[in-house]
Image: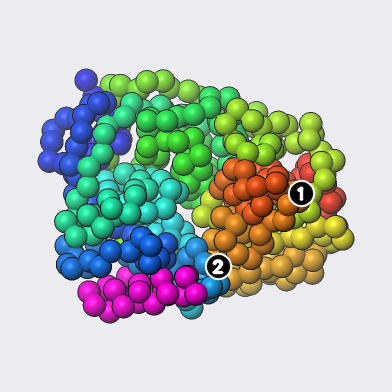
Amino acid sequence: MGMTAIEKILAKNSGQELVKPGDLVVVKVGTAVLYDNNFVPSIWRDILKVYDPERVVVVFDHRVPAKDIISATAQKTGRDFVKKFNIERFHDVGAKQGISHVLVAEHGYALPGSVLVCGDSHTCSAGVFNCAARGTGAPDMFYAVTKGETWFRVGETIRYDFEGTLKSPVSMKDVFLHIADTYGSHANQNVEFGGGALPGLSLNARRTMTTMCAELSAEFATFEPDDVMLDYVRERNPAPFEAQYPDEDANYLARRTINLDKMEPLVALPDTVLENSQKVGDVAGTHIDQAFIGSCANGTLDDFAAAAAVLKGNKVASNVRLLVTPGTQNIYLEALRHGYIETLIEAGAVVTNATCGACGGGHLGVLAAGESCITASTRNFKGRMGDPDSKVYMGSPATVAASAIKGTIADPRDFVN
């Protein structure tokens, strides 16, 4: 019996010819990404050796620039670590700054067919590059950095085939909300994406989907390779790689087709995205105090373009704070060149530096008790973006921009064709 893409990646990197659901595999780690939270004093353990400095990436992203003494101390520790082991792939505050998962995409750090680990839960983002990418705990990260390997249990795989074409302003964030609402949790399962619609989906759109699979509790999320993705990686990383395609007789727990033509704007209600979304029209008029566009899932140039298309010629409602955060400083620069930043600021938005920011309630947009926010970020758990008594709704960047104009949750189709 054949293997899925993830099973073939895990087999390749464990030196086995065949792996199947239920197996425990020890795999070589191609890339280990440490981020600022790993260096927090309560978590950090002094590493005495690094297996291969060329396989390590260090990124400061969660609270950048440092917002307090703890984050400043963590970043100092990280800089000392980088100097000690001559880590070249280092993204400090400045021109190379950004969210770790977005930087992994920009620089081609996730090679097709390889294994990538990071301490952040949205590491599955890199699965867009046909990479077995997963978030791990701090002890596992330290082990991967020092030993160059880690272990996983092989789970069963759900396959989604995308067909048709999205109708603007509907986006892959809406498609994700449809999957989360319709099929619920994918705990202990892998997710594989493919289908005839792939050529019409940008890598940014695809990466939104793999990033959000963390909210399905999926183990791994990956796309079937195509020339668009493979050429993208080759342009950014000269290292050799072997992409892994699913076998024709791969064994899937389920195989589902998603017709993109039928998708429409959705909004996830507060506290979870699982089985908790409604059509935007059913929640239109709901009061909001803040609107946020950003994070590793939706801080791309595509997202800036979508927001600017809605906001152009309009103004943010007086009762709303619209915050927009790019995934990297490079995206910020490109958004400037395209005129998106000017459009956003003229409409009344605040554009921040590249960081995780308001997504995790760390800084740059924390919610007070009783406040409501609609977010195009990764998570809407209770207390995720601030006080536990605040409410977090989730929608696409276009839906968030439309809501910021109305002052209540709104349909983006009212502002763009």
Q: Main secondary structure of the magenta part?
A: helix
Front residue of 71 and 104: 71
Residue type marked 2: Ala
| Residue 146 in sight here | yes
Labels 1 and 2: the sequence-earlier one: 2
**Quadrant placement of the C terminus:** top right
**Residue at screen point 19% across, 50% down:** 149
Which residue lies under the disc numbered 1?
Answer: 370
Front residue of 22 and 171: 22
Asked if 367 appears above or below 86 in the picture, the reply is above
**Quadrant placement of the N terminus:** top left
> SS class of the residue under badge 1?
loop
For residue 138, what is the image quadrant?
A: bottom left
Asked if 79 appears above or below 299 in the picture, the reply is below
Residue type marked 1: Gly
Query: Taking 142 as reference, is 15 left or right?
Result: left
Front residue of 57 and 237: 57
Which residue lies under the disc numbered 2?
Answer: 354
Residue furthest out toward the front: 42
Binning the other alpha carbons within 10 Å of mark 1 as few (below 14), some (14 to 19) or many (20 upward) gives few
> SS class of the residue under badge 2?
loop
Exactly how many numbered labels are in the figure?
A: 2
Residue 61 in percent (x, y) is at: 48, 65
Query: Taking 181 as reference, is 330 left or right?
Result: left
Specify how the rendered protein is coloured. rainbow
Find the magenta span and give its range. Answer: 69-91
Is 246 magenta? The answer is no
Residue 313 in percent (x, y) is at: 84, 61
User: Closer to the camera: disc 1 or disc 2?
Assistant: 1
Q: Which mark is residue 170?
A: none
Query: Taking 241 as reference, is 218 left or right?
Result: right
**Residue at screen point 70% across, 48% down:** 390
